[in-house]
Amino acid sequence: MKARSFSHVGITVSNFNRAVRFYWDVFGCPLVGVADTPPERVRAFFKVAGEAPRCKIGWIRIPGGAVIEIFEFQPQLPPAAIPWNRVGLTHFSMNVRNTHRWYEYLQRRGVECVSPPERSPRGHWFFFARDMDGNLIEMMDLGYMRYVLQWLGPLGGWIFRRGMYRKYYE
């Protein structure tokens, strides 16, 4: 058994409509589905207490096929900073071309950029920005490696599992 592809990432947002507008206005990612969850399911499945807890769920499609699943709960807990060394999700990433232009574009749009674009030791460019609730979004330009990973990724995985990365599979 093996996974077919990456499907989605889920994030809890403070304001559903504001999140929809942010991802559409800034990234051109449309809302493709919405569901309102009944209070009994919010209590039983999500374990959110309250007299009549609510959850609105939306699916925002990223070009290329991945999805951001957004949740707006009522009642809400306040956001908390996620340190890098805490076990768990820290960020999600979007593949882009020309991180320097993206950095300038996001700054013009008033989006918080954590740092300017930098080059990794392996040659790709990246930087981090925050959405309207402070969730970290990595903007990554893999350059030619995007095509290598897309077309040769399965072969590379097979070779690396048997070679230089063997110890991680033992």
Image (tube, rainbow, N blue to C red):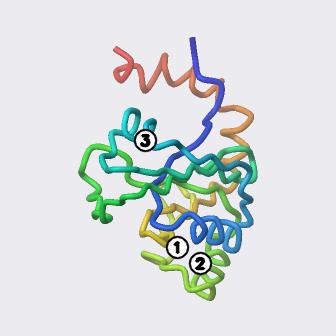
Q: Could one spot residue 116 in this view of the protein?
A: yes
Residue drawn 63% across and 54% down?
142
* Label 3 CA crowd tier, 10 Å (few <14, some 14–19, many 20+): many
The residue that mark 3 highlights is: 42
The residue that mark 1 highlights is: 117
Q: Position of residue 21 (x, y in %)?
A: 65, 71
Residue drawn 75% across and 47% down?
64
Q: Secondary structure at mark 2?
A: helix
- Quadrant assignment, res 147: top right
Q: Could one spot residue 118 in this view of the protein?
A: no
Return the residue nearer the eye: 123 or 153: 153
Mark 2 or mark 1: whose residue is earlier in sequence: 2
Q: Position of residue 130 (x, y in %)?
A: 47, 70
Image quarter (top left, top right, bottom left or bottom right) of the N terminus:
top right
Q: What amino acid type should be assigned to the residue bearing mark 2?
A: Tyr
The residue that mark 2 highlights is: 103
Return the residue nearer the eye: 23 or 48: 48
Is residue 31 left or right of 169 when viewed as pictured?
A: right
Q: Given contact means CB atoms under 8 Å apart, are the residues at marks 1 and 3 in contact? A: no
Mark 3 or mark 2: whose residue is earlier in sequence: 3
Rounded to the nearest whole Å, what is the CA distance between mark 2 and mark 1?
Answer: 7 Å
